[in-house]
Image (cartoon, rainbow, N blue to C red):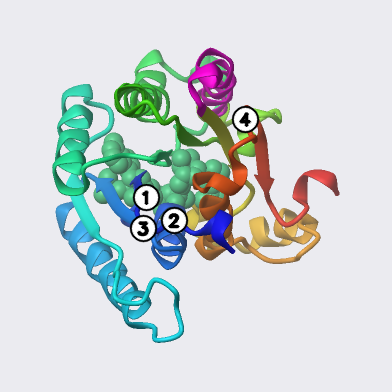
């Protein structure tokens, strides 16, 4: 389907070297996008890039595929999104490599310090918000500047969380960062809509990644929480591939300011 074909489009996925970000990056490559993943760990970046390149080669040589011969490009750049200078540098490197930008998925995130709010100090807030809020702001700023220069609009996808819309007891600081991400997404949707720049958010439910390893290995958590997911399983990074493709594609060009909950039905149970 042409509306979902990303051939010739460039997408950045922050935190694309593992977890949900890598799941989305795989889907984007399969849809034909040139992709740049940004992450801090260069070894993990290189492993993920090799995996994505193999996928790109498969796509490029698929005989029956309309885009056969055009293997999507894959690049990985070291970047700590909490440092705006590194974000700007990674954007420059991405543009040097691919020449344009069509979408940025602000996915890089960290979990916060668990505990009762009155016992947490502000240092814990600064640590989680430096990545989950400031990192997302810097990524969006760099992408918007490029979208405005190109004059063809663009798509921003921000990774929030159910913690941004539900009461996240004992996880309040993380929840506050994700609420901020949702407010930022809606503001961008309104502020830049007339320039063809849209912003949407993905809100994952309980997804098995490094971030959730502690809960995945907890029998109590699985019994008490995963039993309330109508699908009765943890989500996987692959569950996010098609949503990323849709939101980065022309197929969603009139979709702006929305929240996509991907949780196996957890929030409606
Ligand atoms: P993971 O911990 O598995 O992966 C996090 C990714 O972010 C890694 O690629 C990591 O790479 C990168 N990252 C972390 N800090 C930075 C930084 N300072 N600069 C650049 N990259 C960074 O997390 P998930 O895949 O589980 O989470 C992805 C997103 O989804 C996050 O925003 C998270 O809050 C959100 N989410 C996840 C849920 C879940 O159940 N897993 C539920 C709800 C929301 P590196 O370490 O190399 O920098």
State yes or no: discs 1 and 2 in contact (Cβ < 8 Å): yes
Q: Residue furthest right?
A: 269
Label 4: few (<14), some or many (≥20) within 10 Å?
many
Label 3: few (<14), some or many (≥20) within 10 Å?
many
Q: Which residue is mark 3?
A: 18
Disc 4 versus disc 3: nearer the observer? 4
Q: Which residue is mark 1?
A: 9
- Give me the C-alpha separation between circle 1 and circle 2: 5 Å
Q: Does residue 88 appear to the left or right of 195 in the view shown? A: left
Residue occupying image coordinates x 46% and y 20%: 120
Question: Is the CB of mark 3 within 8 Å of ligand 1?
Answer: yes
> Of residues 251 and 264, which is closer to you in this image?
251
- Give me the C-alpha separation between circle 2 and circle 4: 19 Å
Disc 2 versus disc 4: nearer the observer? 2
Q: Main secondary structure of the magenta part?
A: helix
Q: Which residue is mark 4?
A: 256
Q: Does residue 139 appear to the left or right of 194 in the view shown? A: left
Q: Which residue is mark 2?
A: 6
Q: Is residue 136 visible?
A: yes
Numbered disc 1: secondary structure:
loop
Q: Is residue 140 above or below residue 91?
A: above
Query: Where does the magenta region start and end?
Result: 175-197
Residue occupying image coordinates x 40% and y 63%: 32
Residue occupying image coordinates x 57% and y 54%: 3
Q: How many numbered markers are drawn?
A: 4
């Amino acid at each position: 389907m042409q509306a979902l074909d990303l051939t010739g489009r460039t997408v950045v996925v922050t935190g694309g070297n593992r977890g949900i970000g890598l799941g989305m990056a795989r889907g984007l490559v399969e849809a034909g996008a040139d992709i740049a993943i940004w992450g801090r760990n260069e070894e993990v970046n290189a492993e993920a890039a090799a995996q994505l390149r193999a996928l790109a080669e498969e796509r490029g040589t698929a005989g029956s595929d309309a885009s056969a011969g055009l293997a999507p490009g894959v690049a990985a750049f070291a970047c700590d999104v909490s440092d705006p200078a590194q974000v700007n540098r990674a954007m420059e490197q991405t543009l040097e490599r691919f020449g344009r930008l069509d979408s940025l998925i602000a996915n890089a995130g960290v979990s916060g310090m668990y505990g009762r709010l009155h016992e947490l100090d502000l240092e814990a807030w600064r640590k989680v918000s430096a990545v989950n809020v400031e990192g997302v702001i810097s990524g969006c700023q760099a992408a918007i500047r490029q979208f405005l220069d190109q004059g063809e609009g663009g798509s921003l996808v921000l990774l929030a969380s159910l913690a941004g819309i539900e009461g996240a007891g004992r996880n309040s600081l993380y929840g506050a960062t994700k609420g901020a991400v949702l407010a930022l997404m809606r503001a961008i949707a309104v502020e830049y809509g007339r320039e063809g720049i849209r912003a949407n958010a993905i809100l994952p439910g309980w997804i098995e990644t490094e971030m959730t390893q502690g809960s995945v290995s907890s029998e109590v958590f699985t019994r008490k929480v995963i039993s309330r997911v109508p699908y009765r399983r943890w989500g996987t990074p692959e569950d996010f591939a098609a949503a990323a493709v849709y939101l980065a594609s022309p197929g969603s060009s009139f979709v702006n300011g929305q929240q996509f909950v991907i949780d196996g039905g957890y929030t409606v149970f």
